[in-house]
Image (cartoon, grey):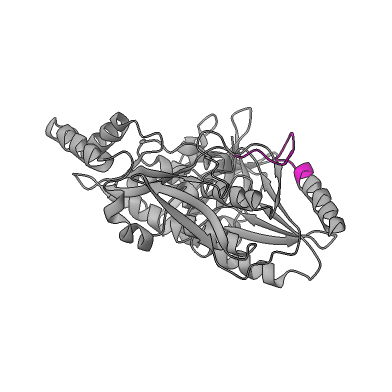
Amino acid sequence: MSGRDLFCQPRRMRRGAALTLLFASVVVAAAATGSFPETDRKSAAGEARSAVPAGHHEDVAKAAEEALADGKSPMEAAERAVSRSGDRWGAVYSEGEYEEFEEALDGQYTGVGLWARRERDGRIEVTKVASGSPAAAAGIHAGDRLASIDGAPVDGRPVTEVVSLLRGDATDAPAGTSVQLGLERGTRAWTQTLRRARLSTDSVTVRKLAGGVTVIKIAAFTKGVGDLVRTAVRQAPVGTGFILDLRGNSGGLVTEAVTTASAFLDGGLVATYDVNGEQQALHADAGGDTTRPLVALVDGGTMSAAELLTGALQDRGRAVVVGSRTFGKGSVQMPSRLPGGSVAELTVGHYRTPSGRSVDGRGITPDLPVAQADSAAAVQRAETVLSGLGDAE
């Protein structure tokens, strides 16, 4: 399982879990699947506190208060309360963790700049190194093996634990603190001490294929992603098409997904969602590119806000969806401060696609299934489909 795959795990109440759902010491950003920006959260605060199910936040707060009275620590009390609430997507943060969570939504994180995954034999392999990061400056390469962190062997450990060690979660290690890595490359073994730094996420990458097709890869819907996508669409060569790669994207800020939809739609409905039984609607801005062909590439790691976007493009006939069935998370969370200072993110509603389809527990079925949607062959299939769409026009 890779660090990227962890981004798709359901966020449970385990301490810090949502902060370690992506990349070894890299990105925690999209752990905020189905979340609204802070400005939207404030405007919706009244609705959230009486949201689905009625009294959900109040019940959890009361349960946490009772657990505190029983002698539980603030985090233990919060975890017990969320666990008993039955909220599948409920998550608990300490105050410090939630501050990191909010920063991550803004596209910032503290780390050394490594992507990593666990191989079948249990070894931890570096899969990517962020440019300009401490890891890059130290000469660490993709393919290197990460053998230890601060002297502790990491073979066989879940990637979540590796992430936690790299980030220094146990001590709330800030930027500037050091971490010692044991590394291997072929027959060479060495140790390297790095200093954690404040880094920016790389949520959008744009590349051109040989035939002129523009591939826009969105790793997470962090702040500013929608505008980056719109810029990429405007700058793409005339007469070419787009592949919108949403594989492994477990969501992020709903408003950024709507802004991304606006890049390809000329206004209109993107999704509806319910809060306490009342229906709300999300609409795209007018003026998007509706003429050039578009393929959305998805897999089982595509979830939440990424599914919202996929469903809108599919329902409105704007994109052909290629890949495998998406994850099936169609819920929206909002935060609630609990007694003791911890924060619980609790489900307040569910969204539907423009045609009224519910995504939660079902996912989105591609128009053209691909057996191994996470492979390079999936991109080739998307390019072939795109070529056909161009011919049809």
Placement of 236 over or under 180, stated as above or below = below
Tell me the quarter of the picture where residue 203 sits. bottom right
Q: Between residues 271 and 145, which one lies in front from this camera angle? A: 271
Choose top left, top right, bottom left or bottom right for residue 70.
Answer: top left
Give left or right: position of 285 versus 66. Answer: right
Q: Is residue 68 left or right of residue 166?
A: left
Q: Main secondary structure of the magenta part?
A: loop
Give the x, y percent position of residue 112: 51, 54
Q: Position of residue 339 (x, y in %)?
A: 18, 44
Left or right for 378, reference 175:
right
Taking the image as drawn, is residue 201 in sight? no
Q: Residue at x 58, y 69 (%)?
A: 286
Residue 351 visible from this viewpoint:
yes
Tell me, yes or no, whether the highlighted magenta stretch contains residue 370: yes
Residue at 69% x, 47% y is 297
- Return the residue nearer the eye: 332 or 379: 332
Task: Give percent across and percent down for residue 48.
Answer: 31, 50
Q: Is residue 222 magenta?
A: no
Q: Is residue 335 left or right of residue 107?
A: left
> Which residues lie in the magenta part?
364-378
Q: Name which residue lies at 54% across and 29% down.
A: 156
